[in-house]
């Protein structure tokens, strides 16, 4: 079966219907480019969940502007849980 590489556009012969790239190099480079595109696309400014300050996250899972806010939030949640009678440390 003759296919066209999704990265470089070269025609290549394969018997595997799932093969999308002509070489492992093309597969790796294409995958790395897709990862970078996804990282940059989702990183928009947001507000810190603790202090409401606007910040630009370096990871799409970040919800706090700094380690200080993260720790303060954890301590506040923990204090509230202890006051409500929950004795578990987490």
Image (tube, rainbow, N blue to C red):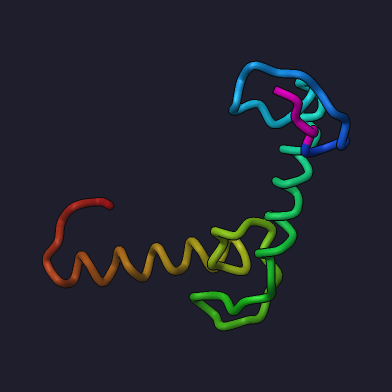
The quarter of the image holding the N terminus is top right
Q: Where residue 77 appears, x then y in whole percent?
A: 33, 68
Range drawn in magenta: 1-5
Residue 82 shown left or right of residue 2 in the figure? left
**Closer-to-camera residue (80/14):** 14
Residue at (70%, 46%) from the top-left corner?
35
Q: Is residue 39 above or below residue 25?
A: below
**Closer-to-camera residue (4/84):** 4
Q: Where residue 34 appears, x then y in whole percent?
A: 72, 46
Extreme-front residue of the structure: 1
The answer to which quarter of the image holds residue 26 is: top right
How many numbered marks appear? 0
Q: Where residue 58 appears, x then y in whole percent?
A: 69, 58
Extreme-bottom residue of the structure: 52
Q: Where residue 73 appears, x then y in whole percent?
A: 43, 68
- Is 47 within the magenta? no
Q: Is residue 67 above or below residue 76?
A: above
- Is 3 within the magenta? yes
Extreme-left residue of the structure: 85
**What secondary structure is the magenta-colored segment mainly?**
strand
Residue at (25%, 51%) from the top-left corner?
89
Residue at (14%, 61%) from the top-left corner?
86
**Closer-to-camera residue (82/1):** 1
Residue at (50%, 75%) from the top-left corner?
49
**Closer-to-camera residue (60/74):** 60
Residue 26 shown left or right of residue 58 in the figure? right
Q: Is residue 4 above or below residue 33?
A: above
């Amino acid at each position: 079966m003759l296919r066209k590489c999704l990265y470089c556009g070269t025609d290549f012969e394969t018997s595997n219907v799932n093969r999308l790239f002509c070489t492992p190099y093309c597969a790796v480079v294409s995958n790395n480019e897709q990862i970078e595109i996804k990282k940059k696309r989702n990183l928009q400014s947001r507000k810190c969940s603790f202090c409401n300050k606007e910040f630009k996250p370096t990871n799409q899972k970040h919800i706090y502007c700094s380690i200080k806010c993260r720790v303060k939030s954890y301590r506040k949640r923990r204090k509230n849980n202890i006051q409500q009678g929950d004795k578990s440390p987490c």
